[in-house]
Image: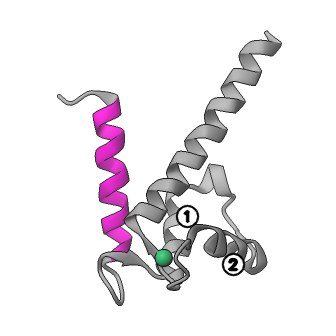
Amino acid sequence: MSKPLEQAIAAMVATFNKYSGKEGDKYTLSKAELKELVSKELPSFMGKQLDERRFQKLMDDLDHNKDNSVDFQEYAVFLATLSTLCNEFFTDMKRKN
Ligand SMILES: [Ca+2]
């Protein structure tokens, strides 16, 4: 049985591949693929209904090389940013208690 952190890394990779293979380049996320991944796999982090303006902002922020798709490295930066926000949230909670 693999450890939780190993499972988390495997889930991160498997989730990317689950959506990246749906259309176009199977090694990158198109805008539609990213939108589906975020709404189905990160609902409590990102909200179930991301409005178009907020989603476009997210896509622009993540797509560092401006090729209109999110590759694995750009996706990994996104998850690292979410992890950092999560850690800050728990650190603040501990400080308050
Ligand atoms: Ca890109």
Q: Quadrant of residue 16?
A: bottom left
Q: Tell whether position 6 is magenta.
A: yes
Residue at the outermost bottom position: 24
What secondary structure is marked by label 2? Answer: helix
| Magenta span dominant secondary structure | helix
Residue type of the residue flagged with mark 1: Val
Q: Earlier in the sequence, mark 2 or mark 1?
A: 1
Colour convention: one colour
Q: Which residue is mark 1?
A: 38
Q: Tell whether position 93 is magenta.
A: no
> Could you tell whether 61 is left or right of 79 in the image?
right
> Could you tell whether 17 is left or right of 62 in the image?
left
Which residue is found at the position 58% from the left and 65% from the top? 39
Residue type of the residue flagged with mark 2: Gln
> Could you tell whether 93 is left or right of 23 in the image?
right
**How far is mark 2 from mark 1, CA to CA?**
12 Å
Instruction: Give the class, few, some or many, for how many residues have Cα within 10 Å of label 1's Cα (few <14, many ≥20).
Output: some
Q: Which residue is mark 2?
A: 56
Residue at the outermost left position: 1
| Comparing labels 2 and 1, the label whose residue is closer to the camera | 2
Q: Is mark 2 within 8 Å of ligand 1?
A: no
* Numbered range of the magenta stretch: 5-20
Which residue is found at the position 75% from the left and 71% from the top? 54
Q: Looking at the picture, does residue 74 appear above or below residue 32?
A: above
Residue at the outermost top position: 97
What secondary structure is marked by label 1? Answer: helix
Q: Quadrant of residue 17?
A: bottom left
Residue 32 in the image: x percent, y percent? 52, 82
> Could you tell whether 31 is left or right of 6 in the image?
right
